[in-house]
Image (cartoon, rainbow, N blue to C red):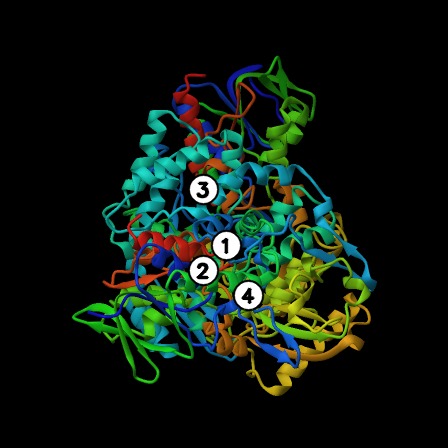
């Protein structure tokens, strides 16, 4: 009899939520984490003396509010801000355009359908392609929820998801800077552009899934979750990469760590990307070839690079701003995307900026600031490879764009770190540098990651999935961890 | 000089003598109704039309192959008796810039041998792919042969229809369901990646997914069109893919003959200016020459924008419907270059006459080439190195050209309706588009330019001005998912009725969409007859 009921792979947001939920449900849980600390994609590291990264993903607005209650997170310091910080467009010369100042029928419609998307986030997924079950009950229930919107709203709700977000937004807005401010954040980490069919769903999700940010940003969120997990009795083992799954008599019953140490348990819940897990970490022959083909088809192309900047002060253009993006029009985003199809990056990339130290002052020394810049679209499989010259070129085009939108920033930089997609892969354990554990696209949301693993249980006894590679995706919602744990506890 | 109708009142007036309008008219006439078809041009067929633009040469001016003409329509209207003859298309030829080439045949074994030269891996997958596609066709066939499902309706019959559609997949293994799901959601390239690795196979195969759309082969939602090639297999004895003898106009003319044989009256050069609406009902039409004709019912086969906003007028509709029609996307993305040649065009990569020229020929040397062509057009200009789909119908149908001479029909993408100078400037850019096409082809056919006797270039603007296709969209509306099925042309109005009593719609702008299927015309007529409105 092993010491643990469950081993959770990964101490990121979803791993922490799953582990804590399981522990509160009476289970004995061990979390194994490859890095030396918790946080996953929200984990911090010092990138310049005195300056810490807010993590790869640093906007905490999507973290599900009901988790605070379920995991008693307020007791461990979690607070949410009163109002949401929205992404603004930075135009040349320091001017900004703020879409939050626009209220429109479009926003009103989002409010009407919000309950459906919130249901998508907080309820178990419909297993649309499950072999034995046609979940008629689920479908009818969900169907009636949608029908209750009224015929007109319902038809609209069915019409929108497969659309290109450019087409959808242009039905309601004209101003290019506003269009770009709404579109850019929704496309982060995707292999989609404003004209890509299905991108409207990304925007719909992004708009509704965000409430207000956690006060103190990612450091505060990670601290609260870690404290809650520890208080619930979860144990942790860091610097422990899982090399493969331990399988006995066809049942997954533990993990094998790099040091060839085997840890046994009843069930394994993996919050890492399911694709390499299923393709590379199981004994050969265990997964039938059709399933292997489906996991190979689970798209994990990374399109993100990150530039972390240590500043000796906040540039004037960023006073009053926490989140911003630099594209002045939808076509600018589209052109940046075009390059990635040919395994290149544009010399006019789209930059998403987060002045993370604004809400998390401990990231920088007094008077200083930390700016996280997510650069799109940057190919993982760059033509010619990620050489030093390639990184210099990326750095140069990024700084040129940044200087244009945030005049004077160059003079404030005291240190920086550039993470190309391969560096992101290495640091955060994200195959392909894909920041959401699998691309966010309509088809990969509806069935995630595979028809036979679309509700956290896999066909392999003892193996569960509980991370961003499962429903409802890899944003910082904590929802996969929560829903997986509930399923594992039999709710 | 336009003729005048024989009567002043009809049971049904059909606006537009394209193949769908003619099909609707034929079915209505067959059911004993008094029908009048009004066609603006001097020749019938709409975009399925043959014209002798140059002495001795008959061109399929717009559409150039018959795709999914429904076998039951051919039977029910006895089209073979009225002159319909389809010559099967047996080959898809891909010339390559490096002097190599790939031909894919209806003979699977022959295709496997050719593909094996590029990729043994892919040649081994071909059979499996064909099998999977044939299975996936079953589901698709239910969609195109029936009126669109209506998810908003609570009527028991509708719910049962929806359940039946879902249940038809019930017995299928998970993997097949997943393939169906991927077919409906992913890009043509992503879908083909499940089986194949070589560009030489994926590029020409994926390009069918973007015909008539403003999307690239890597854009989500372009995979399902791949089914079209396989639908013919399950249509039984009748080969759905092919050339129509006498050009695609031959299809329209056969339907017109059938309609006339059933008693329908058809007038050319009879442009409709207005649909008369009075007291919320359609009463008939007014022609451009001033003639007024009454009818119990008016059936429009022209596109939704033209029908509702131009022929009827926005003021007759509530804002919700008008808004839906205004946002119905019609962005044309293609053009056509029709050539009369004084000799056989010879491809340097596979010289001389040969069966490889008797099907369709694609200038689509790689996926990157196709994506670059799309990228160029996104920002307001046509592709300098475009995708071109070529057929030489005179090789299989000698009736369309003098002996030894040839017709070369070139479909080109991308040519966006909205060029940056404004669509009305297309005439100034027309010849440049023609040159881009000819220059590109000349890279593969060295003697081409010298052999051209006549050249016609149709831009999206020309498709709109001459053929009544708003914004030059060849399907009367993009075939994107938000405009298909129960959303085509507007939510709640996908069963051929319109908000105006007595006005019905039946063109490609209705379910199941574009192509030479005849299905919209047939389903609309049958729905009208079933409604007992007539």
Please give the label number shown on residue B370.
4
Q: Are marks 2 and 1 in contact (CB under 8 Å)?
A: yes
Tell me the chain of label 4: B
User: Of the residues tagged 4 and 1, which is closer to the observer?
Assistant: 1
Q: Left or right: B406 with respect to A393?
A: left
Label 3 packing within 10 angstroms: few (<14), some (14-19), many (20+): many
Q: Left or right: A122 with respect to A188?
A: left
User: Of the residues tagged 2 and 4, which is closer to the observer?
Assistant: 2
Q: Where is residue A257 in the image (x, y as percent from the top left)?
A: 33, 79
Pointer 3 residue? B251
The number of discs equals 4
Residue at image position (48%, 48%) is B247
At numbered mark 4, what does the secondary structure look like: helix, strand or loop? helix
Task: Decide: is B300 above or below B45.
Answer: above
Q: Distance between the residues labelled 4 and 1?
A: 57 Å
**Residue that extends furthest to the top in the rendered view of this protein:** B279
- Closer to the chain start, of discs 2 and 1, is 1
Q: How far apart are marks 2 and 4 (CA)?
A: 53 Å
Asked if labels 3 and 1 share a chain, the reply is no
């Amino acid at each position: 009899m092993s010491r643990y009921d469950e081993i959770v792979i990964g101490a990121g947001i979803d791993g922490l939520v799953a582990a804590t939920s399981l522990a509160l449900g009476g289970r004995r849980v061990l979390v194994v984490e490859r890095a030396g600390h918790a946080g996953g994609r929200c984990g911090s590291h010092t990138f310049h003396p005195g300056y810490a990264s807010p993590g790869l993903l640093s906007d905490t607005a999507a973290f599900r509010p009901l988790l605070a209650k379920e995991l008693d997170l307020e007791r461990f310091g979690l607070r949410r801000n009163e109002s949401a910080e929205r992404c603004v467009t930075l135009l040349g010369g320091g001017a900004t355009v703020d879409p939050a100042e626009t209220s429109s029928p479009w926003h009103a419609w989002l409010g009407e359908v919000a309950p459906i998307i919130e249901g998508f986030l907080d309820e178990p997924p419909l297993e649309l392609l499950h072999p034995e079950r046609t979940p008629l009950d689920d479908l009818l229930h969900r169907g009636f929820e949608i029908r209750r919107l009224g015929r007109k709203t319902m038809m609209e709700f069915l019409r929108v998801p497969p659309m290109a977000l450019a087409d959808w937004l242009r039905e309601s807005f004209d101003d290019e800077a506003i269009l770009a401010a709404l579109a850019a954040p929704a496309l982060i980490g995707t292999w989609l552009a404003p004209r890509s069919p299905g991108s409207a769903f990304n925007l719909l999700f992004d708009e509704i899934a965000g409430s207000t940010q956690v006060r103190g940003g990612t450091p505060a969120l990670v601290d609260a979750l870690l404290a809650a997990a520890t208080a619930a009795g979860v144990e942790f083992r860091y610097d422990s990469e899982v090399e493969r799954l331990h399988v006995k008599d066809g049942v997954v019953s533990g993990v094998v760590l790099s040091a060839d140490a085997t840890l046994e348990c009843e069930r394994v819940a993996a919050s890492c990307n399911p694709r390499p897990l299923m393709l590379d970490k199981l004994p050969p022959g265990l997964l039938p070839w059709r399933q292997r083909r489906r996991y190979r088809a689970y798209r994990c192309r990374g399109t993100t690079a990150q530039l972390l900047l240590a500043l000796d002060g906040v540039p004037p253009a960023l006073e009053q701003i926490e989140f911003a993006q630099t594209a002045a029009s939808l076509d600018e985003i589209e052109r940046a995307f075009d390059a990635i199809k040919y395994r290149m990056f544009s010399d006019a990339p789209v930059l998403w900026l987060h002045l993370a130290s604004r809400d998390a002052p401990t990231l920088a020394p007094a008077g200083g600031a930390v700016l996280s810049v997510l650069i799109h679209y940057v190919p993982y499989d760059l033509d010619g490879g990620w050489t030093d010259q390639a990184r210099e070129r990326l750095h140069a085009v990024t700084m040129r764009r940044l200087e244009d939108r945030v005049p004077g920033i160059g003079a404030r930089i005291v240190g920086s770190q550039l993470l190309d997609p391969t560096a992101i892969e290495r640091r955060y354990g994200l195959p392909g540098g894909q920041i959401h554990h699998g691309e966010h696209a309509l088809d990969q949301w509806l069935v995630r990651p595979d028809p036979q693993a679309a509700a956290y249980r896999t066909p392999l006894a003892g193996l569960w999935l509980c991370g961003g590679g499962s429903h409802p995706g890899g944003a910082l919602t904590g929802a996969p961890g929560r829903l997986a744990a509930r399923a594992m506890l039999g709710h | 000089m336009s003729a005048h109708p024989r009567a002043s009142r009809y049971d049904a007036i059909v606006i537009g003598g394209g193949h769908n309008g003619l099909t609707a008219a034929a079915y209505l006439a067959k059911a004993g109704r008094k029908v009048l078809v009004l066609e603006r041009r001097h020749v019938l067929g709409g975009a399925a039309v043959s014209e002798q633009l140059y002495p001795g040469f008959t061109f399929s001016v717009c559409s150039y192959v018959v795709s999914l003409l429904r076998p039951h329509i051919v039977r029910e209207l006895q089209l073979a008796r009225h002159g319909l003859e389809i010559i099967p298309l047996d080959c898809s030829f891909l010339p390559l810039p490096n002097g190599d080439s790939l031909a894919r045949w209806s003979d699977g074994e022959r295709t496997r041998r050719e593909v094996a030269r590029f990729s043994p891996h892919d040649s081994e997958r071909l059979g499996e792919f064909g099998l999977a596609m044939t299975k996936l066709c079953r589901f698709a066939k239910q969609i195109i042969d029936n009126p669109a499902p209506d998810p908003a309706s609570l009527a028991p019959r509708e719910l049962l229809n929806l359940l039946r559609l879902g249940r038809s997949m019930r017995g299928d293994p998970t993997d097949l369901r997943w393939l169906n799901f991927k077919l409906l959601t992913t890009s043509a390239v992503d879908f083909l990646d499940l089986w194949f690795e070589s560009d030489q196979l994926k590029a020409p195969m994926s390009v069918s997914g973007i015909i008539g759309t403003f999307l690239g082969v890597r854009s989500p939602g372009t995979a399902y069109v791949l089914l079209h090639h396989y639908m013919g297999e399950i249509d039984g004895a009748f080969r759905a893919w092919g050339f129509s003898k006498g050009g695609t106009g031959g299809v329209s003319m056969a339907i017109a003959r059938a309609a006339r044989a059933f008693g329908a009256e058809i007038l050319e050069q009879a442009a409709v200016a207005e649909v008369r609406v009075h007291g919320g009902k359609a009463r008939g039409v007014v022609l451009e020459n001033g003639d007024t004709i009454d009818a119990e019912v008016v059936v429009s086969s022209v596109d939704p924008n033209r029908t509702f906003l131009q022929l009827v007028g926005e003021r007759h509709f509530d804002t919700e419907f008008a808004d839906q029609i205004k946002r119905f996307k019609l962005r044309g993305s293609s053009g056509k270059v029709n050539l009369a040649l004084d000799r056989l065009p010879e491809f340097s990569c596979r010289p001389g006459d040969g069966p490889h020229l008797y099907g369709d020929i694609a200038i689509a040397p790689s996926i990157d080439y196709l994506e670059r062509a799309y990228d160029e057009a996104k920002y307001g200009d046509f592709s300098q190195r475009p995708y071109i789909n070529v057929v030489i119908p005179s090789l299989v149908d000698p009736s369309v050209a003098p002996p030894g001479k040839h017709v070369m029909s070139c479909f080109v993408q991308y040519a966006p309706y909205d060029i940056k100078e404004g669509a009305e400037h297309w005439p100034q850019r027309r010849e440049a588009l023609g040159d881009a096409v000819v220059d590109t082809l000349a890279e593969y056919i060295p003697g081409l330019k010298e052999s051209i006797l006549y050249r016609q270039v149709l831009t999206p603007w020309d498709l709109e001005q001459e053929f009544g296709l708003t914004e030059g969209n060849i399907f009367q509306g993009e075939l994107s998912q938000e405009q298909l099925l129960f959303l085509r042309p507007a939510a709640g109005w996908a069963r051929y009725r319109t908000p105006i009593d007595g006005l019905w719609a039946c063109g490609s702008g209705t379910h199941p969409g574009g192509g030479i299927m005849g299905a919209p015309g047939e389903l609309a007529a049958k729905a009208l007859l079933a409604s007992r409105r007539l």
